[in-house]
Amino acid sequence: MKVYFLGTGTSQGIPVIGSNHSVCLSKDKKDKRLRVAVWVYSDDFSIVIDCGPDFRQQMLTSKCQYIDSLLITHEHADHTAGLDDIRPFYFKQGDISIYAHTRVLKNLAKRFDYIFESENKYPGAPSVIPIEVKENESFKIKNQIIEPINVWHGNLQVFGYKIRDFVYLTDVKKVDQTEIEKIKKCKVLVVNCLREEPHNTHFNLEEALDFISLVQPKKAYLTHISHLLGFHGEVQKKLPKNVFLAYDNLEISI
Ligand SMILES: [Zn+2]
C-alpha cells in the first residue's frame, strides 16, 4: 500500500497569497504546500482523503487515474472546496462514492446541491453516492477495511481514518482515550501540526509531539502545516528521529 501526500499545508496553503514572510518566499520545493489531502492506494483500491480547493492540481501532479472513493474528514473548505473537480473521474467511472459523517454530507449537499440532487440534473454535473460514516463502525471499500477514528477540532467532531497499519488524523486538538487505544503502536501515524504557538483548534508542535509519544507509532509524519512553523529543512532537524515533516508529493510505502 502506498500513501501519497497530495497536500500538507494549512487552510491558506504556502505561500499565502500576498505574503512576504520568508517561508512564503522560500525557493525550497518542500516549503510549497497545497491544502491538506492524501491518496492511499494499492493494486486493489484507490482512496483519496479530503478534496480541498487544490484537488485538480493534486490529481494532475500525482497522476491519479481512478478513485474508488473519497473519504472526508470534515466540512471545512480547505478539505472540501474542490468537490466539483471530481468531474473527470465521474465522466470516466460514473457516480463516485463519498464517505463522511452525516452532518458533513448534509453540509456538502447544501453547498454542492447540483452534485447531490438526483432529479432534473444538469447533464455535465458530477454525481456522488453519499455514504454515512458512523463512530465505532468500520466499513469496507473494495476488500479494504477502514476504521473511523473520532477526534476533536475544538468543538467540531472530525473523522480520522485507519487503513491497515496507517492512521491519518488532521485538524485535531483533542483525542479521547478510547480512540487513542484504537491506533496505539500503528506503523505510520500522520497528524496535524500547525506551528509552535498554541492554537484553539489545532495541535501545535509540542502537542503533536506529545500525542505521538502517547500513540507510539513506528514513524510519524506531521501535516497541515502553516508557514509560521518555519522552513522545512530547519524544522526537520529539531524533530525526534522517528518524526518527519511531510511535504507535498512525498510518497511512502506501508
Ligand atoms: Zn483544515
Image (spheres, rainbow, N blue to C red):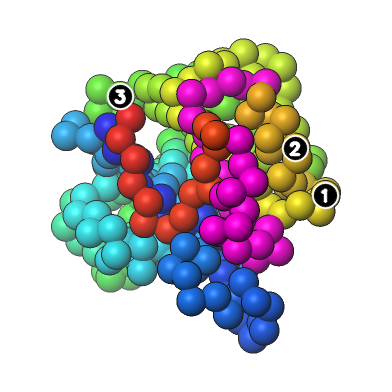
53 to 170, vertically: above or below: below
From the top left corner, tell me how far across and down residue 251 is, in percent.
33, 46
Q: Quadrant of the N terminus?
A: top left
Which amino acid lies under the numbered mark 1 shown in the image of this protein? Pro
Please state if 154 lies on the left or on the right of 140 as rendered: right
From the top left corner, tell me how far across and down residue 37 is, in percent.
46, 51
The residue pinned by badge 1 equals 198
Cβ of mark 3 under 8 Å from ligand 1: the answer is no
The residue pinned by badge 2 equals 207
Q: CA distance from mark 2 to mark 3?
A: 31 Å
Q: Cβ–Cβ below 8 Å for labels 3 and 1?
A: no
Q: CA distance from mark 1 to mark 2?
A: 9 Å
Task: Please give the name of the residue rendered at 28% of the width and 70% of the height, measured from the top-left corner.
Answer: 124
Task: Please give the name of the residue rendered at 81% of the width and 53% of the height, measured from the top-left corner.
Answer: 197
* Few, some or many residues within 10 Å of mark 1 (<14, 14–19, 20+): few
Task: Please give the name of the residue rendered at 48% of the width and 24% of the height, measured from the top-left corner.
Answer: 218
* Res. 156 visible in picture: no
Q: CA distance from mark 3 to mark 1?
A: 37 Å
Task: Please give the name of the residue rendered at 36% of the width and 62% of the height, measured from the top-left corner.
Answer: 58
Q: Quadrant of the C terminus?
A: top left
Residue segment shown in magenta: 214-240
Q: Quadrant of residue 87?
A: bottom left
Would you say residue 235 sits in the magenta stretch? yes
Cβ of mark 1 under 8 Å from ligand 1: the answer is no
The residue pinned by badge 3 equals 144
Identify the secondary structure beneath mark 1: loop
From the top left corner, tell me how far across and down residue 174 is, in percent.
75, 33
From the top left corner, tell me how far across and down residue 102 is, in percent.
57, 38
